[in-house]
Image (cartoon, grey):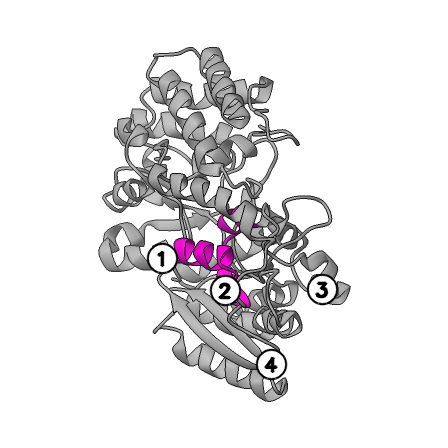
Amino acid sequence: MVSWCRWRSPRRWFMFACLGLLLSGLISCQGKQPQSMEGKVSFWTMQLQPKFNQYFDELIGTFERENPPEQVNWVDIPWNAMESKILTAVSANTAPDVVNLNPTFASLLASKNAWLNLEQEVRPEVKARYLPSIWQANSLREGEVFGFPWYLTTRITIYNQDLLRQAGLSAPPATFAELAVAAKAIRETTGKYGFFITFSPSDSAEALESLVQMGVRLVDDDGRAAFNSPAGKVAFQYWVDLYQQGLLPPEVLTEGHRRAGDLYQSGAIAFLSAGPELLASLEKNAPSIAKVSAAAPQIVGETGKRNVAVMNLVIPRSTQNPTGAIKFAEFVTNTDNQFTFIKQANVLPSTIGAVDKYREELAKISNASSLENARRVALEQLPTAEVLIPPMANLNQLKRIIYENLGAAMVGNKTVDQALQDAEQVWNDNLKG
């Protein structure tokens, strides 16, 4: 599977904060000329070579033949270097014409007006290609969209059928309320845990997304804390209760999302929130667990919302070839080219047409494997999935503040009310600074 760019450390956040000050003064200024000019399109991707060289060579060749005199220069950047490279390039006005980024990171520069506003630049019939919620995922404010959706992933629930049977459960849980009941039954009858979700501040935002799924609004329109609310108290209490009842592994406060995979692979937990391709890994590394594993839709809260992660293509506002850049981004993300790419990369498409084509293809398979069934589950929930946390330049800071205070409540160092109040105050005080 293709790699996804993540923010992982306070050190990286500090770099972003410092560069943000630099960018605020530089993005609107004229500096060096951008790398491209009319008839040339420079294109940066994240860690797609050498696996997808043939795909992109053919894609670019077709585009150039169909759109003379446009010529595309493709540069692939290691995923852990993209953040610093694109920040530096944008601040120096030497950015490429089309860049492969995710909404969370792209929003850092979108807030500084670094990208073209595609709501103004793209024809309505092109916008209509994409799943509506996915097109809007690249939006910081109404009337502004900064990226073309490209490929997607969405979590499903992979579950151990043997542990469910031992616990007397006839089906995997569909909601967080059902998950709590199932976790208790599994713990009492098998001694195993129901599931693992990380509250480590430097890792996954899945627990933060769970709050949104439970109906919590994280921040208001002005960016101030909105999570200290009745819904926030219920959501905090949910995780506190599970932890204090011994229904979560104690290391959820310190270990990252990889620990969940390790525990599931060893048979120590019954449910795993992951992408369908995890089943292929299980077949290789834990065949006995793979044999008793099946897939179900992502667990939801009262809102019914399910998560999706988006990778997109953005176009710097400084491009000297906006026509060619838009034309190329539309070409890369059209239904036919997406469908070809997602089959090779084992991801999901963002256009309505490609979703329909993939659904038809999977429906034709008889005697489907567990992996193919898992892909069906993921695909079927895609039209109603959404980016649960709006693009925010300071998302990692919000996650850290909430996780640290929620963790303090989980271990009994704070009440739920105090944890919410403290998190609210720290977040709002940071906004003032």
Q: Amino acid at mark 3?
A: Val
Magenta stretch, residue numbers: 82-109
Observer-side mark, 4 or 1, equals: 4
| Residue 81: assigned label | 1
Q: Which residue is mark 2?
A: 94
Q: Earlier in the sequence, mark 2 or mark 1?
A: 1
Labelled pair 2, 4 in contact (Cβ < 8 Å): no
| Residues at marks 2 and 4, CA–CA distance in whole angstroms | 17 Å
Q: Earlier in the sequence, mark 3 or mark 2?
A: 2
Labelled pair 4, 1 in contact (Cβ < 8 Å): no
Q: Amino acid at mark 1?
A: Ala
Q: Which residue is mark 3?
A: 122
Observer-side mark, 2 or 4, equals: 2
Q: Position of residue 205 (x, y in %)?
A: 44, 38
Q: Amino acid at mark 2?
A: Thr
Which quadrant holds the N terminus?
bottom left
| Element type where label 3 sits in the image | loop
Is residue 372 at all visible to an observer of this figure? yes
Relative to 163, 87 lies left or right: right
Q: Position of residue 394 (x, y in %)?
A: 49, 37
Q: Earlier in the sequence, mark 2 or mark 4?
A: 4
Q: Which residue is mark 4?
A: 39
The residue lying toward the viewer, choosing from 145 and 304, is: 145
| Residue 202: assigned label | none
Look at the image and say whether residue 86 sits in the magenta stretch.
Answer: yes
Observer-side mark, 4 or 3, equals: 4
| Residues at marks 4 and 1, CA–CA distance in whole angstroms | 28 Å
Observer-side mark, 3 or 1, equals: 1
Q: Residues within 10 Å of mark 2 (few under 14, many from 20)?
A: some
Q: Earlier in the sequence, mark 4 or mark 3?
A: 4
Q: Earlier in the sequence, mark 4 or mark 1?
A: 4
Is residue 107 at all visible to an observer of this figure? no
